[in-house]
Image (cartoon, rainbow, N blue to C red):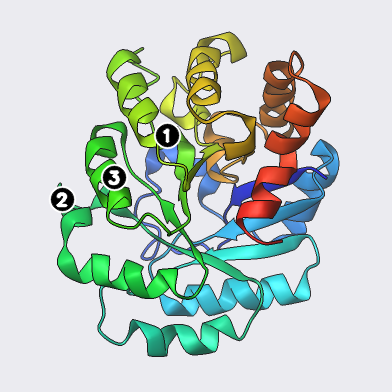
């Protein structure tokens, strides 16, 4: 089974998606399950995980409703205020829907040191008791902070989004590589092969320019802790959905059949309890 472990859905408004600037015109529209079904059919994707794009409970409930109605969407990584004292009470109704698989906060937009906040860490302790995952969304420079964070929660399942967004466009790899290898030493962390085309030059990237970053992630995590994702529809500014999966196919071709199966779906199915 081929699983897209990371995509978004939204009703577009300029107020709620202010980060979609003039360079991202293709994203300034609705992206709904019908669009997802069409893209997945063309790329032979069998199941997906929908991930939050807004930090609201309203969106989390909406994504869960879409997952309930659409068999392609097997799970949701939503948002709740992890630092809030009433997090357990907030999670209770969300957990009633079996499609909720994890939570995420947009840490890449927060100041340095956010993951050291005591209230946020108390929230992660509460999250651990639920069995939900936590998706780590950061830039490469935040990897040391994320490693400290993970060390405080050795029994929490973490998923690193977008290979921690290295600066592919500038060609920087050494510092990111060292930091991601260090994080990968923690066995409770898995990593998504996603979000790479948008960290590269949108107009000139090729599979070969991205492959060194794939190679580092594969070396650091191994196939059993890597999962394929698209970051659709964000990737549309630099790629088509099918083109991205064809790129992944090229990289995975030299691997054994079992290693390919792990990355294409089995890791995601295990980590997100699909």
- Disc nearest the viewer among 2 and 3: 3
Q: Which residue is mark 2?
A: 111
- Single out the residue that lies furthest toward the top: 208
Residue in the image at 81% along x and 66% along y: 71
Query: Which badge, 2 or 3, comes first in the chain's sequence?
Result: 2
Q: Position of residue 214 (x, y in %)?
A: 54, 21
Residue 35 disc label: none
Q: Residue at x 51, y 18 (%)?
A: 203
Give neighbour class at mark 1: few <14, some 14-19, many 20+ (Cα, 10 Å).
many
- In the shown orientation, is residue 229 left or right of residue 79? right
| Secondary element type, mark 1 | helix
Q: Are marks 2 and 1 in contact (CB under 8 Å)?
A: no
Query: Would you place residue 240 above or below residue 16 in this image?
Result: above
Q: Label for residue 184? A: 1
Query: Quick one: label 2 or label 1, which is nearer the N terminus?
Result: 2
- Image vertical order of residue 123 relative to residue 232, above or below: below
Residue 218 location, quadrant: top right
Instruction: Look at 49% across and 88% down and name the residue there.
Output: 92
Q: Residue 268: horizontal and vertical position, in percent?
A: 65, 49
Residue 243 point in image, percent of width and height: 70, 27
Disc 3: which residue: 146
Question: Which SS class for mark 3?
Answer: helix
């Amino acid at each position: 089974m081929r699983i897209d472990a990371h995509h978004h859905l939204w009703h577009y408004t300029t107020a709620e998606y202010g980060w979609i600037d003039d360079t991202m015109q293709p994203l300034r529209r609705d992206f709904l399950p019908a669009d997802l079904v069409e893209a997945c059919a063309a790329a032979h994707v069998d199941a997906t995980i929908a991930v939050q794009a807004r930090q609201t409970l309203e969106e989390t409930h909406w994504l869960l409703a879409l997952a309930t109605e659409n068999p392609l969407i097997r799970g949701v990584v939503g948002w709740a205020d992890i630092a809030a004292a009433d997090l357990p009470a907030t999670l209770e109704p969300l957990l009633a829907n079996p499609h909720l698989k994890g939570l995420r906060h947009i840490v890449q937009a927060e100041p340095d040191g956010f993951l050291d906040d005591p209230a946020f860490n108390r929230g992660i302790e509460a999250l651990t008791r639920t069995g939900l995952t936590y998706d780590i969304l950061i830039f490469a420079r935040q990897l040391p902070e994320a490693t400290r964070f993970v060390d405080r929660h050795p029994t929490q399942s973490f998923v690193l989004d977008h290979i921690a967004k290295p600066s592919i466009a500038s060609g920087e790899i050494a510092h990111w590589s060292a930091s991601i290898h260090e994080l990968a030493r923690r066995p409770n962390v898995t990593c998504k092969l996603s979000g790479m085309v948008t960290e590269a030059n949108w107009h000139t990237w090729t599979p070969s320019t991205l492959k060194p970053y794939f190679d580092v992630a594969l070396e650091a995590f191994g196939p059993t802790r890597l999962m394929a994702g698209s970051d659709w529809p964000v990737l549309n500014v630099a790629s088509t959905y099918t083109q991205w999966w064809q790129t992944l196919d090229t990289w995975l071709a030299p691997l054994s059949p079992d290693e390919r199966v792990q990355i294409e779906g089995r890791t995601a199915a295990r980590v997100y309890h699909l």
